[in-house]
Amino acid sequence: MGDKRAVIAIGGNALIRDRLHATVKDQYRAMSETTDHLANLVVAGWELAVTHGNGPQVGFILRRSELARHELHEIPLDVCGADTQGAIGYALQQNLVNDLRRLGDHTEVTTVVTQVEVHPDDPAWVRPAKPIGSFMDEEMAGVRRGEGWHVVEDAGRGWRRVVPSPAPVRIIEVAAVKMLMDAGFVVIAVGGGGVPVVCDAEGNLHGVEAVIDKDPASALLASEIGADLLVITTGVEKVALDWGKPEQRWVDQLTMAEAEQYLLEGGHFAAGSMAPKVRACIEYLESGGGEVIITNAESLEQAIDGKTGTRIVR
């Protein structure tokens, strides 16, 4: 076992390269390009928990469900999350074990289907904003609205379902993740931010129709397992300030205070992509976490060695 524990959050671009390469076989190949780097970290002595996104995969399940609704029951959103955790976890663990064996390493890899508790009075419930599933015409939007969906018009492209994205508050299976890591396993967990559940007055858990952002869920996992390092992978090698503007500049390091200030100012980090990642990094550091790196999957080893990537420190 290593003596350094890290959570590596894999971005969606590491699972699906582009819309023309989205089959199960394409996804498997894309994952193999990331698991190579994960295997090198394991061999270097890192204990790993690996998290991942699942947005497109959930969209595919929902679309199949819609197309078959005249013949088969539809799939609830929480079950879609559980399904994708199993399927993506299977592909990641198989790829990673194969990569490790090629390196002469016999570390075991497993997937934990993970529930993540959200608060029933989170403000997100009254402001559903996370678009999911396929576009629909106005007539179908009306049908779905009558069935209880929140449906909004999406910039002239059609109508789309939106669901709440509440904050994660507790990882239900965290003890299992810890136990497996202590026993030397690489654990794939909290896929897609986890299956969202609420806890009732009797302490029973119930799945809910919501989507949890993978990055704050990964930050919570890193805090709860006592990880020394949180790495969030994305499509770029480093974080940029003034993103997309002529004065855009890449940064090697930010303090937590600087990152908070740039978030407050706005305009530095893209709202739907980099901003929530930076926010999640701050949450991890505020809860006592060690170190944070944001980089792309292909630069994982070099970033951890301090040669690239963006570090956020206290």
Image (cartoon, grey):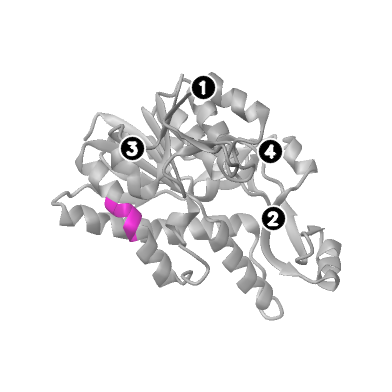
Q: Nearer the viewer, mark 3 or mark 4?
A: 3
Query: Residue 238 at x, y = what percent?
Result: 44, 39
Residues marked 3 and 2 touching at CB (< 8 Å) = no
Q: Amino acid at mark 3?
A: Ala
Q: Is residue 4 magenta?
A: no
Q: Position of residue 296 (x, y in %)?
A: 41, 46
The residue that mark 2 highlights is 131
Placement of 291 over or under 128, stated as above or below:
above
Relative to residue 213, is residue 101 drawn left or right?
left
> Which residue carries the number 4 mark?
200
**Residue 256, label in figure:** 1
Label 3 crowd (10 A; few <14 / some 14-19 / many >=20): many
Residue extending furthest bottom?
Answer: 71
Identified at 59% across, 38% down, the residue is 269
Q: Please, what is the dominant secondary structure of the magenta stretch?
A: helix
Residue 173 visible in the snapshot: yes
Q: Three-letter amino acid code at disc 4?
A: Asp
Q: Magenta segment, which residues?
A: 32-36
- Residue drawn at 31 percent across, 44 percent down: 186
Q: CA distance from mark 2 to mark 4?
A: 27 Å
Residue 33 painted magenta: yes
Secondary structure of residue under mark 1: helix
Could you tell me the amino acid type at mark 2? Answer: Pro
- Which circle, 4 or 1, is nearer the viewer? 1
In this rendering, would 142 be left or right of 170?
Answer: right
Quarter of the figure with the N terminus = top left
Q: Return the residue at label 3.
A: 303
Marked residue nearer the N-terminal end (2 or 4): 2
Are the residues flagged by discs 1 and 2 in contact, CB closer than 8 Å? no
